[in-house]
Image: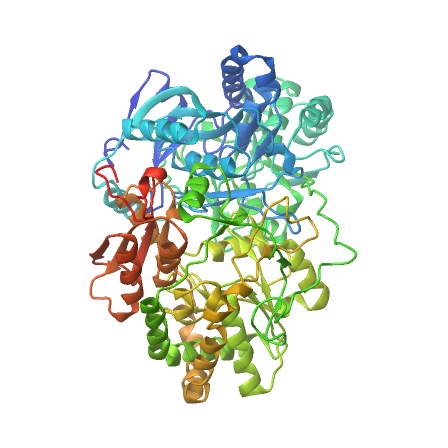
């Protein structure tokens, strides 16, 4: 890495003992820190791996002890998937604390209590799915564990998300190595001061990574020069033995849904018996031959801790096991393998994912340093593969590239141990589900046009000034869905812009509606059930329903449902839809995509439910869905207004004191705004163009469905990449503060504290209303090149009460 890529490590003496370097096959980050004590990429003695976590846990205990025994007793540990799940669990062992790790595996019926993004990762979205939500609801110290601490962005995302729901006074960040630069150290301190919390960091070593300016280009060239990883040489298949470990009933296999002190005691008591069964399978004759002297226990992605403890217990059972038994796990991360003693990743086995993942089923998985390569001394005589029952699928067993088949070519004996995946009991379906709301009692839409799967909160005082809401959200004092912004009342000048925009774009919207409707009809059949994402998606759902009625005589049911970023889709609404319709017939509808956060939220929430997560939108400038009317970023006039173009219905609200487990998410009906309501006029103006665009819509749908145009529909997430680039260029910690597209930018101007607007150079009348709002709020509009959207709205990234003046207009300072 130093000679070929120009990447070097600097820092404390212990650093080279803990990590090496390798090249990622990832354009987001070229280098990979390869830990020698984590048990992920490099096989290591299990006592060393567990011991590193225990040492960190004891250091945290030493940090908390002076604060009183109560601080230690109330501490909770949170680890990061997938790399640090075992490390975090080991830290929790050293602290004797309850443990939870994030996961990328959704569970049907289990609503996430939070989520966050790991922006440099291949699979960025993390879910928090404790079986008991009270695990994260305490006020004791929260200990966050990752394998490395390089910039702090992931940790900051997590702390902000969790602090918004359950504020606490003390956070402790734990990592094997701390490689932050001075700017990142200041950023963490600034965040602690902003939130008013204590934030400590504990690591075994610190230092830095020195990268040449062209490191991404160098890495790309080196990977291209290396070519594909060599296949293991042909060899007879080694015997495969399946062992039943008799895992204790009800004992979680890890911390995906929480692991308590009681669980820890049960596991410690069970480990000797589990190891005895495993040893009998590894060495059925009671004496392992020389050709099987080395044993590898191989875990599976997030399933790191149980295989680690089994490996440690096995080492105690086998003669000489301390030196002979090693441990590592499979991973999602693609890394360049070079069979050279001076490089951390010597060999690579690549195989298909075998757990039917909800997020990226087509991606390969990898096992590093398992095959011996050119060094016979590195050969493992026996490989014990430990997976959970979710991953024990035909893809694990069948085919030349399957993991078990490849393992049988590089060792003399393969032992398969399958643990029962812990499945928390999902909330029971209520006997009498909540009932929909209809207009005109709720909303100004006709009763036959939409059924609102919402709880009426019209009499509840939920509005707060925009500046106060922004401060509360960014400081972690509240989630954005716990209150409502004061409804913006447009000036006569702004209302005229809306009507002008509607006149100009109505035909274009009608064509997009027809294209989506005809595509859905051909792909999903005439039994369509429309579920629009309230509230921006609801006018779109009504328009699609009108198209199907006018052109095909169909009376498609249409419901409006709530989805909240970080909280998922309304589970009560899903239960209602599932009880009244076939899940496969339900199509989720929205107006447009921005960077794709709601697209991801929907896919994660629906995984394993039977509902199709394919979101249908009129405009997809973020390029993150496959069912759309256009990918142009143009003004859909309904984005210009709030409730007065959406049936006089507010944003949706999710707050535990208002919404019970069997309730729909809530919303308000603003009857007092009826005089300004243009909801019906918007629908009628667009629908008047249906006949004119019908032939074009039919042709567009046929083109989308032709096999030769399949690539045109495939999402490439270019919008998300642009948002990440803008976040980096403007020094914004969270991608949630970057709102791309004309629709999302409008929302920033109406509901949030805007910082600035980036406008694509030469963008025309589609941005007139944005420019007007920017002028009214004192927000600068910058014209930029190479912008895939018409515009991007930036929320003020370091918001305080001083970020706006008395008039509510933005105050620009040198710092901002």
Left or right: residue 426 versus residue 515 is right
Which residue occupies the foreground of this view, 301 or 544? 544
Q: Position of residue 320 (x, y in %)?
A: 59, 17
Would residue 318 be seen by someone viewing this image from the given angle? Answer: yes
Q: Position of residue 772 (x, y in %)?
A: 28, 62
Q: Residue furthest right?
A: 431
In the rendered image of this protein, does residue 548 appear above or below residue 629? Answer: below
Q: Position of residue 651 (x, y in %)?
A: 51, 57
Instruction: Tell me what residue is drawn at x 69 percent, y 59 percent.
Output: 575
In the rendered image of this protein, does residue 557 appear above or below residue 607? Answer: below
Residue 177 image-quadrant placement: top left
Q: Quadrant of the C terminus?
A: top left
Residue 25 image-quadrant placement: top left
Instruction: Tell me what residue is drawn at x 36 percent, y 48 percent.
Output: 753
Left or right: residue 156 versus residue 89 is left
Counting labels gives: 0
Q: Position of residue 37 (x, y in %)?
A: 47, 24
Would residue 180 be seen by someone viewing this image from the given angle? Answer: no
Q: Quadrant of the N terminus?
A: top left
Which residue occupies the foreground of this view, 475 or 488? 488
Left or right: residue 246 versus residue 290 is right
Q: How is the image coloured?
A: rainbow
Which residue occupies the foreground of this view, 15 or 623? 623
């Amino acid at each position: 890495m130093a000679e070929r890529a120009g990447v070097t490590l600097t820092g404390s003496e212990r650093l080279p003992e803990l990590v090496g370097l390798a090249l990622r096959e990832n354009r987001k980050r070229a280098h990979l820190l390869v830990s020698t004590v984590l048990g992920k990429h490099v096989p290591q003695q299990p006592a060393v791996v567990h011991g590193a976590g225990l040492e960190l846990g004891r250091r945290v205990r030493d940090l908390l002890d002076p604060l009183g025994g109560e601080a230690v007793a109330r501490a909770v540990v949170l680890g990061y998937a997938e790399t640090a799940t075992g490390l975090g669990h080991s830290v929790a062992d050293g602290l004797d604390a309850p443990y939870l790790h994030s996961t990328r595996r959704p569970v049907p019926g289990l609503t996430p209590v939070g989520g966050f993004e790991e922006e440099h990762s291949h699979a960025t979205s993390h879910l928090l799915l404790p079986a008991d939500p009270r695990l994260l609801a305490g006020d004791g110290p929260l200990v966050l564990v990752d394998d490395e601490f390089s910039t702090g962005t992931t940790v900051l995302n997590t702390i902000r998300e969790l602090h918004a729901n359950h504020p606490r006074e003390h956070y402790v960040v734990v990592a094997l190595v701390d490689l932050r630069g001075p700017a990142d150290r200041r950023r963490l301190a600034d965040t602690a001061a902003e939130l008013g919390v204590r934030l400590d960091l504990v690591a075994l070593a610190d230092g830095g990574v020195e990268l040449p300016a062209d490191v991404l280009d160098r890495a790309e060239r080196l990977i291209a020069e290396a070519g594909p990883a060599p296949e293991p040489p042909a060899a007879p298949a080694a015997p495969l033995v399946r062992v039943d470990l008799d895992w204790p009933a009800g004992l979680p296999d890890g911390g995906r849904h929480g692991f308590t002190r009681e669980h820890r005691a049960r596991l410690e008591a069970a480990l000797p018996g589990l190891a005895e069964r495993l040893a009998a399978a590894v060495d059925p004759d009671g004496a392992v031959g020389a050709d099987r002297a080395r044993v590898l226990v191989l875990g599976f992605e997030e399933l790191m801790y149980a295989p680690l403890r089994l490996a440690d217990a096995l080492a105690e059972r086998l003669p000489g096991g301390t030196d002979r038994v090693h441990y590592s796990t499979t991973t999602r991360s693609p890394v360049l393998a070079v069979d050279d003693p001076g490089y951390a990743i010597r060999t690579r086995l690549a195989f298909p994912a075998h757990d039917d993942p909800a997020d990226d089923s087509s991606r390969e998985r990898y096992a590093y340093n398992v095959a011996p390569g050119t060094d016979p001394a590195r050969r493992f005589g026996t490989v014990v593969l430990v997976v959970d029952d979710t991953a024990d699928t035909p893809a694990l067993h069948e085919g030349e590239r399957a993991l078990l088949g490849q393992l049988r070519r590089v060792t003399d004996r393969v032992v398969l141990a399958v643990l029962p995946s812990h499945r928390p009991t999902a909330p029971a379906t209520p006997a009498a589900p909540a009932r929909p709301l209809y207009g005109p009692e709720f909303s100004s839409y006709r009763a036959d046009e939409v059924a609102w799967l919402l709880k009426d909160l019209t009499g509840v005082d939920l509005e707060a000034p925009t500046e106060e809401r922004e401060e509360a959200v960014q400081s972690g004092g509240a989630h954005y869905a716990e209150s409502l912004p004061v409804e913006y009342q447009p000036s006569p000048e702004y209302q005229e812009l809306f009507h002008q925009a509607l006149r100009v774009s109505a035909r274009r919207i009608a064509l997009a509606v027809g294209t989506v409707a005809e595509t859905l009809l051909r792909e999903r059949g005439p039994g369509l059930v429309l579920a629009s994402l309230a509230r921006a998606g609801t006018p779109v759902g009504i328009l699609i329903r009108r198209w199907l009625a006018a052109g095909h005589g169909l009376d498609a049911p249409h419901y409006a449902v709530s989805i909240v970023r970080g909280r998922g889709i309304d589970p009560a609404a899903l239960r209602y839809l599932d009880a009244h319709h076939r899940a496969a017939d339900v199509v989720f509808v929205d107006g447009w995509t921005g960077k794709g956060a709601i697209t991801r939220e929907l896919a994660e929430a629906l995984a394993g439910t039977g509902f199709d997560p394919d979101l249908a939108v009129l405009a997809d400038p973020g390029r993150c869905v496959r069912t759309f009317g256009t990918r142009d970023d143009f003004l859909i006039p309904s984005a210009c207004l709030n409730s007065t173009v959406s049936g006089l219905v507010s944003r949706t609200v999710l707050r535990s004191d208002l919404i019970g487990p069997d309730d729909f998410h809530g919303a308000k009906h603003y009857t007092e705004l009826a005089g300004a309501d243009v909801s019906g006029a918007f629908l009628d103006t667009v629908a008047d163009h249906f006949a004119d665009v019908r032939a074009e819509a039919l042709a567009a749908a046929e083109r989308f469905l032709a096999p030769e145009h399949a690539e045109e529909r495939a999402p490439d997430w270019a919008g998300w990449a642009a948002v990440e680039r803008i976040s980096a260029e403007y020094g914004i910690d969270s991608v949630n503060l970057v709102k791309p597209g004309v629709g999302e930018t409008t929302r920033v101007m109406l509901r949030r504290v805007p910082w600035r607007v980036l406008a694509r150079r030469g963008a025309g009348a589609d941005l007139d209303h944005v420019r007007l709002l920017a002028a009214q709020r004192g927000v600068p509009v910058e014209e930029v090149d190479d912008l895939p959207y018409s515009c991007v709205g930036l929320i003020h990234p370091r918001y305080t009460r001083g970020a706006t003046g008395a008039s509510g207009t933005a105050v620009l300072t040198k710092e901002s």
